[in-house]
């Protein structure tokens, strides 16, 4: 099949957004022969060419790597909650240009550029299991997923083989194994804690994190090669060692000759034709000129991020959809989920003074979920579960500064690394509460004349109970491993801080209770697909990006099949 562009402004497919989901949609659609337009609201970022800090050390930067307070307060009043710095802030939105409102605290961390947050994501890459896909139906929260693990498993494999995922096979029912490259190594203290957990607990396993990093050989894309252990990933990797749209999927899409990327393109709405009951394309505002443009296509993929994609649907009003496209259920904008994090425990360890580690590993350890995974699980007073991410390291020579050392003694101390310390933080599932929502504020318009978003969402009793458990369990496990000076910490991170926002246009079996069907199609407008975080029906406790990729590839291939059958 060979679709072709028939005239200026008309394409076979339009993809809104160029991040993790948008890049995958572009690759799959272009490889299938569709002339595809990718619309990105932010600026162009070219792989390597537009990574200005990728090789710079702190002394090469105007402020030593820190962003001056006056810049932070003026432009990044909300983005600062995540902790960006001078090396990567060019990949974060300015709140001064892209503000939002919060009824309750909500962290909405965004990256507006070609590649989106695929340039700055944490790269933790985990499959979901049927424990996750069946959870809603079993405990009654939310609606049932219209798919199960068997439906998405081949697509997990499809994307993993392409992006490169390093990790260790464990054969755990709650955490299916991936198509793995060789794992990164745990250091000596992490290995000690791992062995302790194996010895003293029947339900707990520690492994190296599963990450989208090449550890052996090369992968498809723009010259992607093995990780150099620089741990400068969020600056953009010149080696393409970790997966990003810029280094991987977009170059592959471009190589087909079927890709057109248009940056600085703010999508205002999806255009609907009442006669055909299909979308005909999108309306775009040029970010620089403010000119309003229209682009036509046979299918539309919304991959702008969970909140942005849903905002576009809500703005896409017509006589047929007075409350937003595909919103017959009234669920559009509701059921906001995230992962709660920012709390756990840490401790010091006496020993291994003759051991160290090589390089700066861009990864940590992972402890998969062990709560509520079956009848054998210890009884707890909350639903669902959590995992841990963490790491161990030696304190560095900077400790000596507090001692005001000088001369020969200082030189001696600098050569001696400090003691070992280990920490682990929980990643907990958030239930899909209908009342956790986003709305559009037409009284407060942005610079493009579009409504801004207001968030009204919070963690509830189940999440609070879960967090208390994981803090206590973290401390208990560190104590069991012989750690000392154990400290429990809790930053009080609000919803959104996990940067795993999802659920605002959920998949489901019934159009009365969901926005999308099992192939990520809007129930009432089948040539519109939503495959980013908006589509998620539950949150699980694992990082969700791999699932977004698999769902996107699956939906794109289904869309191509339906186009061949003239069903769209």
Image (spheres, rainbow, N blue to C red):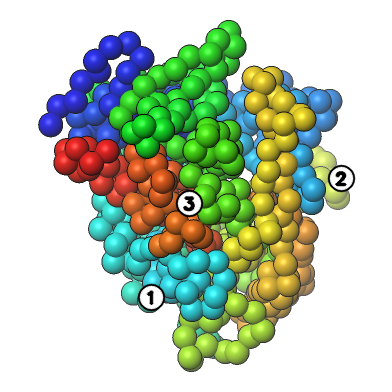
At x 59%, y 63%, the residue is: 432
State the separation of the CA atoms marked 1 and 3: 32 Å
State the separation of the CA atoms marked 2 and 3: 62 Å
Residue under pointer 3: 515
Residue 443's place in the image compared with 352, above or below, is above
State the separation of the CA atoms marked 1 and 2: 51 Å
Residue 83's place in the image compared with 89, above or below, is below
Residue under pointer 2: 404
Q: Is residue 306 left or right of residue 127?
A: right
Tell me the crowding category of disc 3: few under 14, some 14 to 19, or many 20 or more residues within 10 angstroms, Cα based: many
At x 20%, y 20%, the residue is: 4
Q: Position of residue 187 (x, y in %)?
A: 50, 62
Residue 452's place in the image compared with 146, above or below, is above
Q: Is residue 209 left or right of residue 240?
A: right
Which of discs 2 and 3 lies nearer the camera? The answer is 3
| Residue nearest the viewer, comparing 10 with 271 | 271
Q: Position of residue 150 (x, y in %)?
A: 29, 66
Residue under pointer 1: 172
Q: Is residue 34 visible?
A: yes
Q: Earlier in the sequence, mark 1 or mark 2?
A: 1
Q: Earlier in the sequence, mark 2 or mark 3?
A: 2
Q: Secondary structure at mark 3?
A: loop
Which of discs 1 and 3 lies nearer the camera? The answer is 3
Tell me the crowding category of disc 2: few under 14, some 14 to 19, or many 20 or more residues within 10 angstroms, Cα based: few
């Amino acid at each position: 099949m060979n679709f072709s562009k028939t005239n200026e402004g008309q394409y076979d497919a339009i993809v809104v957004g160029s991040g993790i989901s948008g890049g995958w949609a572009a690759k799959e659609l272009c490889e299938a022969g569709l002339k595809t337009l990718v619309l990105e609201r932010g600026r162009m970022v070219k792989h390597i060419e537009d990574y200005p800090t990728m090789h710079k050390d702190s002394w090469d930067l105007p402020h030593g790597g820190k962003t001056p307070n006056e810049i932070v307060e003026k432009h990044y009043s909300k983005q600062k909650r995540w902790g960006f710095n001078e090396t990567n802030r060019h990949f974060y939105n300015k709140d001064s240009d892209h503000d939002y409102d919060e009824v309750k605290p909500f962290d909405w961390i965004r990256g507006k550029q070609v590649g989106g947050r695929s340039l700055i994501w944490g790269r933790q890459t985990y499959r979901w299991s049927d424990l996750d896909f069946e959870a809603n139906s079993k405990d009654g929260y939310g609606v049932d997923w219209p798919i199960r693990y068997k439906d998405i498993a081949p697509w997990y494999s499809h994307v993993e083989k392409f992006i490169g995922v390093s990790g260790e096979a464990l054969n755990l029912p709650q955490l299916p194994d991936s198509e793995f490259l060789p794992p990164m190594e745990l250091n000596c203290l992490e290995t000690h804690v791992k062995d302790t957990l194996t010895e003293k607990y029947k339900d707990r396993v520690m492994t190296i994190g599963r990450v989208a990093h090449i550890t052996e050989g090369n992968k498809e894309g723009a010259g992607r090669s093995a990780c150099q252990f620089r741990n400068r990933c969020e600056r953009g990797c010149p080696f393409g060692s970790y997966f990003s749209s810029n280094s991987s999927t977009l170059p592959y899409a471009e190589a087909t000759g079927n890709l057109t990327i248009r940056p600085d393109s703010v999508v205002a709405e999806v255009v609907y034709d009442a006669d055909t009951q299909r979308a005909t394309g999108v309306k775009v505002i040029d970010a620089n000129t403010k000119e309003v443009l229209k682009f036509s296509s046979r299918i539309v993929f919304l991959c702008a991020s969970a909140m942005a994609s849903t905002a576009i649907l809500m703005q896409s009003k017509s006589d047929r959809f007075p409350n937003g496209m595909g919103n017959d259920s009234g669920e559009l904008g509701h059921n906001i989920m995230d992962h709660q994090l920012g709390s756990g425990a840490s401790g010091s360890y006496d020993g291994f003074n003759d051991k160290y580690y090589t390089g700066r590993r861009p990864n940590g350890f992972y402890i998969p979920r062990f709560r509520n995974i079956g009848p054998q699980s210890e009884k707890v007073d909350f639903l669902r579960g959590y995992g841990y991410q963490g790491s161990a390291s030696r304190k560095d020579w900077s400790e000596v500064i507090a001692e005001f050392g000088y001369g020969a003694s200082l030189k001696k101390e600098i050569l001696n690394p400090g003691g070992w310390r280990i920490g682990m933080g929980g990643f907990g599932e958030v239930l899909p509460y209908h009342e956790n929502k986003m709305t559009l504020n037409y009284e407060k318009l942005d610079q493009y004349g579009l409504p801004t978003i207001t968030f009204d969402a919070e963690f509830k009793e189940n999440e609070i109970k879960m967090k208390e458990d994981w803090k206590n369990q973290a401390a208990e496990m560190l104590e069991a491993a012989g750690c000392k000076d154990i400290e429990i910490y809790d930053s009080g991170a609000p919803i959104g801080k996990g940067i795993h926002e999802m659920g605002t246009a959920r998949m489901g079996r019934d159009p009365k209770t969901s926005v999308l069907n099992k192939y990520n199609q809007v129930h009432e407008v089948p040539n519109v697909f939503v495959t980013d975080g908006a589509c998620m029906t539950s949150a699980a406790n694992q990082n969700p990006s791999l699932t977004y990729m698999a769902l996107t590839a699956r939906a794109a291939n289904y869309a191509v099949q339906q186009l061949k059958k003239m069903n769209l």
